[in-house]
Amino acid sequence: MKQKVLAHIGSLMGGMVHNLNTPLMWIMGRAQLVQSRNEKLDTLNGKDGEDLRAMKTKNIKDLKSIQDGADKIDHILKSLGYKIQMTNEGYTSIELREFLERETDFLMADMRFKHETLREVEPGPRSCYVKCDYNALSCAFTGIIETIMNSTEKGRALKISLENGAILFRCPDLKLTPEIRGMVESVCLGIRGRADIVMGDEHGFEISLWIKDA
């Protein structure tokens, strides 16, 4: 299971580099604009204060953009760090809200998940700890999402939530056929016996994973 998680991390490194490069280039561009304006301050000395106020407003706007870009980079690096740390820990205590947030943040490196999926992620308001093999749970989590993306078209709707201690996936664009059921059971082999896995299709594809805490 650990090798599968590491392989998945490796397969998404290209997308992660792209996701890092975009805010990084934005930060560099905005920083250059701020620097350019600062260099003009001496030439405005003694002039109407309106010019200085306009420059200050632009700098405030660009500094906010720089902070937003830095926050995006921070999210990406934290999700990568989380996966590497948890992969090495294996069987451990997992806080499911953090798990949901970090795993979905990391999946933003998959362009299908980022650009072709109408995502709704709701980690819920409460912390929820379970003892589980992180690698097995991560393989099941990403495997279910891969199954959904591989079996649906662009523009698919996908809701991932944490409700009453269970991880729920809902995709109204997918039907629960015997083939889909078999694919889900296959990616969840690592948590079989450690989790209750319930599938349904009353409102499209639905699956819940409830981890049996030791």
Image (tube, rainbow, N blue to C red):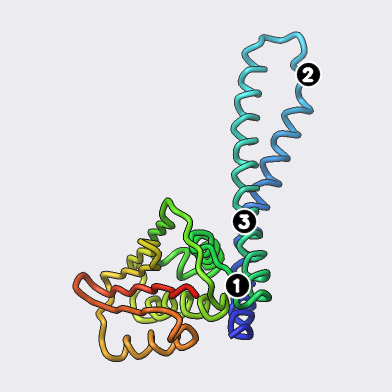
Left or right: residue 81 compared with residue 187:
right
- Residue 8, given in percent of the width and then of the height, sits at 58, 79
What is the distance, in whole Å, between disc 1 and disc 2 at their CAs?
61 Å
Q: Nearer the viewer, residue 171 or 18?
A: 171
**Mark carried by residue 22:** 3
Left or right: residue 175 compared with residue 44:
left
Q: Residue at x 67, y 71 (%)?
A: 84
- Residue 30, given in percent of the width and then of the height, sits at 67, 41
Q: Quadrant of residue 156?
A: bottom left
Label 1 vs 3, first from the N-terminus: 3
Mark 2, other Cα within 10 Å: few <14 / some 14–19 / many ≥20: few
Vertical placement of residue 140 versus 127, above or below = below
> Which secondary structure, mark 1?
strand
Q: Nearer the viewer, mark 1 or mark 3?
A: 1
Q: Is residue 161 at least partly visible in the picture?
A: no
Q: Residue at x 74, y 16 (%)?
A: 44
> Which secondary structure, mark 2?
helix
Q: Nearer the viewer, residue 94 or 99?
A: 94
Q: Amino acid at mark 2?
A: Thr
Q: Residue at x 67, y 9 (%)?
A: 48
Q: Nearer the viewer, residue 9 or 193?
A: 193
Residue where numbered disc 2 is placed: 43
